[in-house]
Every structure is written in structure tokens, then in C-alpha cells.
Amino acid sequence: MASCFINFQTEPLRGAGAPIATLGITAPQAAAIIADCRWLIYVLGTWLPAVRAWSPACTDAAAAAQTGSGATPITLPVFTAPALPGPEGSLPAVVPVAPGALGRVFDLVQFIKNSPGRTDAIESDLRTVGPAITPAPAGPLQPVIKALVNGLHVDIKWNWGGHAAEVDLLQIQVDRGDGKGWVDLAHDTTPNYTDTAAFPVASTIWKYRGIFHVNGAPTGVWSETVSVVVGGVETRIPLLNPRARNRARGNSRGTSGACKHRPIHGRATRRKLCRGLTAHTEFRRAARGEGLIKTSQRTAEMDLIGSLRNACETDIVQAQAQVKYDYFRRQLNDEREFRLDLYKNFDAFLKRIPW
């Protein structure tokens, strides 16, 4: 960064040929900005690298003080700042200046840009304008889509990608793994679409892709293929034995020993957790065989986290309508607060997953 200030300490702002009068800059202002630039070049280009090179010695000394060995007392490293540069040709010696030197340099650059005497040649000399940037050649239009299992349907997420003014719609196709290959699902004119087709009994990978249309014809290239796992047989996991479950619901004749069984009321949780875990397992098995793209793998991870998130609250809501004893109702309330925290944490985690 120090090199950015070099031009402000050389001829364009000094000497008889400098354009300071044309720009409306006084001689004292030019001298002050040169001092600022000289100071910043020293701090950023000499002093700061020296500090960084010295700091590991401090870390080593602290480690030796705590866990080192030997009988000789430790001598702590002392930092010696590099000497301030003296005059260089017609440039003055480096001297410390008031805080805010960078802001003053930026203010001067803006002053020059607003000056009536500003010319392209002066700004090029001062390098206050960058080189012309040749824009990269525009590539073919390619939509970006995302597929997420949401309950018993699949949400297809997409947007115009900055081409809303020129694109008419998105053609979405699906391959349901039934041997029919790619078939049209929708010609969507509004971002985001929901596939409401019934899930199969067996775990199956559904693939989706999309392409933009302009003036009634496909334009550009197809999006990357995204995949989700749908269907599958649920696994039964007994979280509560029948006797404990009856006690939690208040169906037992007595309550002796009932407090030993905290009501987990896991029927709804079992369904959601098992569906998410089964789908994720099936996806990983299929992915090894088909070499699916990273986008699809990331989608599967999001589906799994989403299943865990949704399972946090469902069984609590269901159990509140079934549990009769006040004791267990109080436990349910405590449990629900804990589940809400879990839900929020899962939700926050989902939002941090890169698109």
C-alpha cells in the first residue's frame, strides 16, 4: 500500500513545473501532503514490517517464560524502530505527522478531481485514476437454481441473475429416475417454483435443471443439475417404552415412578429424523455411484439440517395436546424452550451455508 503514496511525494506537486497553481493547491498544502505521504511510506513500508518480524520473538519469549528450561534468566526482546529516513534528493526528511494522514491524502485526491484545472494528463501523472478496464466478454446466459425438500414437496429456488429486463421465463425440467429422462416441469415466469408431485415409496434421486427463454426460445445454456433425495421407508426407533409413554399421557392407573420418565413424546420426531437421516444416507450412497456435483451434495446437507431443525418442535406441539398431568405439562414447557433454542441454532446454521 505504501507505493500508492509515492507519486504524491514527487514532481507533480513540487517544483516550478508542478501543476499546483492550476489545481488551486498552495505551496504549504503541497508541502504538508508530501510530509503525510513520506510518513505513511515509512510507517507502512518500513516500520510495520519490522514490527511484524519482531513479534514472533515476543511469542517465543512468552512461551519460554511459561514452559522453558535452563538456569539462565530470560532477556525479553526489545523492539528498536528503524531510523527515520533523511532527505532524498529534493524530498525532505521523514518526520512524524498528526494522525489522519491517509484521510488527508484522500481529501486532496477528491479536491483534485473537483478542481476546474483538472485534466486527464494531470490525473494520469498523479495516478489518481486507474487504467482502463476492458470488460470480460459476456458469457452465455446460465441460470442458477437450487432444489430443497420441504415437507412433501420440493422447492425450486431461482432468480433472474440480473437479466430480468431481457429474459422472459425459466424452463424447468426434472428427471425423476423413472427411465423417462428429462421432462418439462414448468415454464415459470416468477422466481421460485414448487414441485408438488407425490414422492415415491422407495428412496429416489430427483434431478432438476433450468434454462432461460427470450422471445419464446431457449437462450444460453442449461443450469448445473441439482439433485434431492425423496421418498424412502421410515425406520422405527422406540424412544419410549409403551408403559412410560402411557404414563406420560396420563393413561396409567397410578403415577408411581412416572416422574422417572421424562416425556420425550418422540413419535413425530422419529418420523422426521428418520426421514431426513434415511434420505441423506440414500443420497450419499447414490452420489458415490453417480459422481454428483458439489451443489447437489450441499443441497443434501441442507436437507438433513432442515429435517433436524423441523424435528425440534413438531413432537412438542403434538404432545401438549395429549399430556394430562400438570407435572408433565411443566416439563413440556421447559422442554419447549430448549427445543426453540435448538430450532434457532439449526436455522442460523442453515443461513450460514454458502449458496
Image (cartoon, helix red, strand yellow):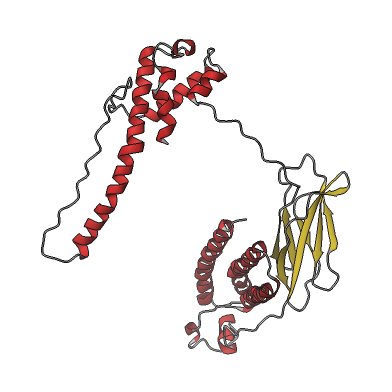
- Drawn side of residue 162 relative to residue 126, left or right: right
Q: Quadrant of the C terminus?
A: bottom right
Quarter of the image holding residue 263? bottom right
Q: In the image, residue 270 lies at what x, y percent?
A: 62, 78
| Furthest residue toward front | 89
Q: In the image, residue 156 lies at what x, y percent?
A: 74, 58
Q: Is residue 283 above or below residue 131?
A: below
Q: In the image, residue 230 lies at what x, y percent?
A: 73, 71
- Drawn side of residue 48 relative to residue 312, left or right: left
Q: In the image, residue 192 lies at what x, y percent?
A: 75, 54
Question: Measuring 40% from the left and 22% from the top, which residue is drawn there?
Answer: 10
The residue closer to the viewer here, 182 or 19, is: 19
Q: Is residue 339 above or below residue 38?
A: below
The residue closer to the viewer here, 258 or 7, is: 7
Question: Measuring 43% from the left and 26% from the top, which residue is drawn there?
Answer: 7
The residue closer to the viewer here, 348 or 297, is: 297
Q: Is residue 292 above or below residue 201?
A: above
